[in-house]
Amino acid sequence: MACRLGCAVIVAASLFSPAFARADDTPLSADQMALATQVVQAFGIQQVADAAMDGLRMVLVQSLAARNNQPQDKVAGIVDAVLVPDLKALEPQFVASVADSYGHAFTTDELQQILTFYQTPTGVKLAALIPSLTQQMVVAGHAWIQQAATQVLQADEGKLSAQGLSTQ
């Protein structure tokens, strides 16, 4: 259970840290940052942040409830009152960090083209579907990982055994 709580904290730190690792640390102009922020808002960065927050909240509630032998509903109230406001206060850093990454990855002209696309009916539809499609990709990825790992471990059990490793 400690790993789940620790992992949740690491995920939160990585999602809401003020900077992503990139080679170019040159500050963006105010206009570039504003345009990049419009782009990430157009594709639904707030939905991404909200979904991450919901997942983190759930893990924190479950982990703290188990660790403290308390009912989840009681712990949820405490998490909502104590932790969630502080986490929510960090969301603007996450949005700014993502916008900064986009601002460094694309030229001003490219950002404008992306924003224009997201303002079309197809772009609006894509932005609306991104959370659902992302969730479907995560589910598909987890299923594939489990299936692939099982298949490879079974197929290569003899090779692992020869190297002194057991899959049992």
Image (cartoon, rainbow, N blue to C red):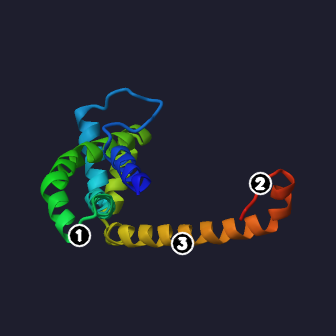
Tell me the quarter of the image containing the N terminus: bottom left
Mark 1 residue element: loop
- Disc 2 residue crowd, few under 14, some 14–19, many 20+, Cα 10 Å: few
Mark 3 residue element: helix
Furthest residue in direction left, as rendered: 81
- Disc 3 residue crowd, few under 14, some 14–19, many 20+, Cα 10 Å: few
Indicate the position of residue 30 as horizontal and vertical percent values.
23, 34
Q: Is residue 80 left or right of residue 117?
A: left
Task: Pick the residue in front: 135 or 106.
Answer: 135
Residue 165 numbered mark, or none: 2
Furthest residue in direction top, as rendered: 26
Mark 2 residue element: loop
Which amino acid type is shown beneath numbered disc 3? Ala
Q: Is residue 34 visible?
A: yes
Residue matched to label 3:
140
Q: Tell me which numbered mark, 1 or 2, is placed earlier along the sequence.
A: 1
Q: Tell me the residue at 77%/54% (across/down).
A: 165
Q: Tell me which numbered mark, 3 or 1, is placed earlier along the sequence.
A: 1
Q: Mark 3 and mark 2: span between their CA atoms?
A: 29 Å
Q: Mark 3 and mark 1: span between their CA atoms?
A: 32 Å
Indicate the position of residue 98 as horizontal and vertical percent values.
34, 45
Which amino acid type is shown beneath numbered disc 1? Pro
- Residue 26 quadrant: top left
Which amino acid type is shown beneath numbered disc 2? Leu
Q: Is residue 54 visible?
A: no
Indicate the position of residue 29 as horizontal and vertical percent values.
27, 31
Indicate the position of residue 41 as horizontal and vertical percent values.
26, 55
Residue 84 numbered mark, or none: none
Question: Pointer 3 and pointer 1: residues touching (CB < 8 Å)?
Answer: no
Residue 97 vertical position relative to residue 146 in the rendered view, above or below: above
Residue matched to label 1:
71
Q: Is residue 122 left or right of residue 168?
A: left
